[in-house]
Image (cartoon, rainbow, N blue to C red):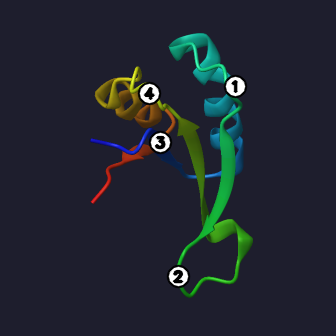
Amino acid sequence: MSDGRHVLVLPDRDAAEEVARELADRFGVTDEPQLVRDALAGEDDAEDAQWLVVVEDPAGRLDPGALDDFAAEYEGWLETPR
């Protein structure tokens, strides 16, 4: 199970910003998701960065499968905890 946090991995900033906006409408997320630029190892070019949308979910209300499907609409995915 997650630690109350979900991390959606998106291909670019535009997709990450759109996902962050949509989370409130689709999933009722009330806390502002955090956007984090995740440069790929060894890459200096900003274009070669993924963006992470970090969603706090302390009550465990969000369905990981639905979040993964949602991220897939933007060519992304839900990072699964190891």
- Where's the C terminus, which quadrant? bottom left
Q: Is residue 44 left or right of residue 74?
A: right
Farthest residue, direction bottom? 42
Q: Secondary structure at mark 3?
A: strand
Q: Which residue is mark 4?
A: 70
Q: Which residue is mark 1?
A: 21
Q: Which residue is mark 3?
A: 5
- Where's the N terminus, which quadrant? top left
Asked whether 44 or 57 is in front, the reply is 57
In three-dimensional space, the C-alpha distance between marks 3 and 2, rounded to whole angstroms, equals: 23 Å
In three-dimensional space, the C-alpha distance between marks 3 and 4, rounded to whole angstroms, equals: 16 Å
In three-dimensional space, the C-alpha distance between marks 4 and 1, rounded to whole angstroms, equals: 12 Å
| Labels 1 and 2: the sequence-earlier one | 1
Q: Position of residue 50 (x, y in %)?
A: 58, 60
Disc 3 or disc 4, which is closer to the eye? 3
In three-dimensional space, the C-alpha distance between marks 3 and 1, rounded to whole angstroms, equals: 17 Å
| Labels 3 and 1: the sequence-earlier one | 3
Given the image, on which type of amino acid does mark 3 rest? Answer: Arg
Q: Label 1 near label 4: C-beta < 8 Å?
A: no
Q: Secondary structure at mark 4?
A: helix
